[in-house]
Image: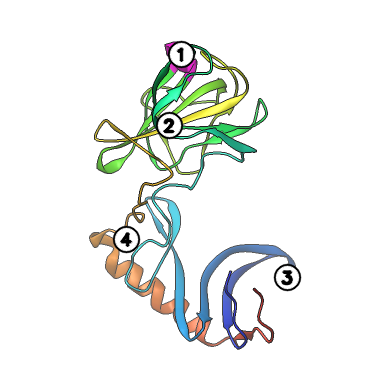
Amino acid sequence: TDLRKGDTFRILVEGLYRDGEFKKYGNILAAEFVNDGVLSRAYRFEVDGRADYYDAGGRSLRKAFLKAPLSFRRVSSGFSKSRLHPVLKIRRAHNGTDYVAPKGTPVSAMANGQVVAAGWQGGYGKLVVIRHPNGYKTFYGHLSGFAKGVRKGAVVTQGQLIGTVGSTGMSTGPHLHFEMRVNDRPVNPRKVVIPPGEPVPEALQASYKSVRDQLAGQLASAPPMRFETASR
């Protein structure tokens, strides 16, 4: 978002071939970006069968939580200690964010975790609750339905489809009611400082460093691409 004239980048990507003929690109294995003289690098590495990107020290470059669990049109209600309820017409706390979106819009898990509830729950209608590491829980209410396999005890990954937008329960129209709780205390999801993802485990550090060094060598052998004009 803040490119400067003279910034450079390199990308190391898989090329997929069949019978010696190039078919398409595969995974990005490593990337380098120099922005206003500041160097950033990312390396692809798998932990427990799941690929992610890490810096040179093995720290995750992914945030632990997505910014939002769906593609939405607008926010109709935010986190509030005293909101006039659109159905009950009384003032009471609104412990989440209401994202307006068409019925059937895909809803994704905000982060890796385990489903602790998936079913009908009063005013929430069809609700999914996911427990995440470090005391976090996320709530997804008023769903029209659940994704296949999303049930109590299921393990989900960040970005995985968990359901679709609906208007079940105490709702005046299609939207997602989203809540975040930390140690069972409701917090404003739009103001929470999102922690980084999990780093490479200590037991895999040696393996990671070997992969990192190999990718870094290949990356360095490619001439950098240079931005000739600034884009603001």
Q: Neighbour class for label 3 at 10 Å: few (<14), some, many (≥20)?
A: few
Q: Which residue is mark 1?
A: 123
Q: What amino acid is labelled 4 in the image?
A: Val
**Sequence order check: which comes first, mark 1 or mark 2?**
2
**Sequence order check: which comes first, mark 3 or mark 1?**
3
Q: Quadrant of the C terminus?
A: bottom right
| Cα distance in 3D space between marks 3 and 2 | 54 Å
| Cα distance in 3D space between marks 1 and 2 | 14 Å
Q: Which residue is mark 4?
A: 200
**144 is higher (above) or lower (below) than 60:** above
| Cα distance in 3D space between marks 4 and 3 | 35 Å
Q: Which residue is mark 3?
A: 20
Q: Quadrant of residue 157?
A: top left
**Sequence order check: which comes first, mark 4 or mark 3?**
3
| Cα distance in 3D space between marks 1 and 4 | 41 Å
| Cα distance in 3D space between marks 3 and 1 | 59 Å
Q: Which mark is residue 22?
A: none
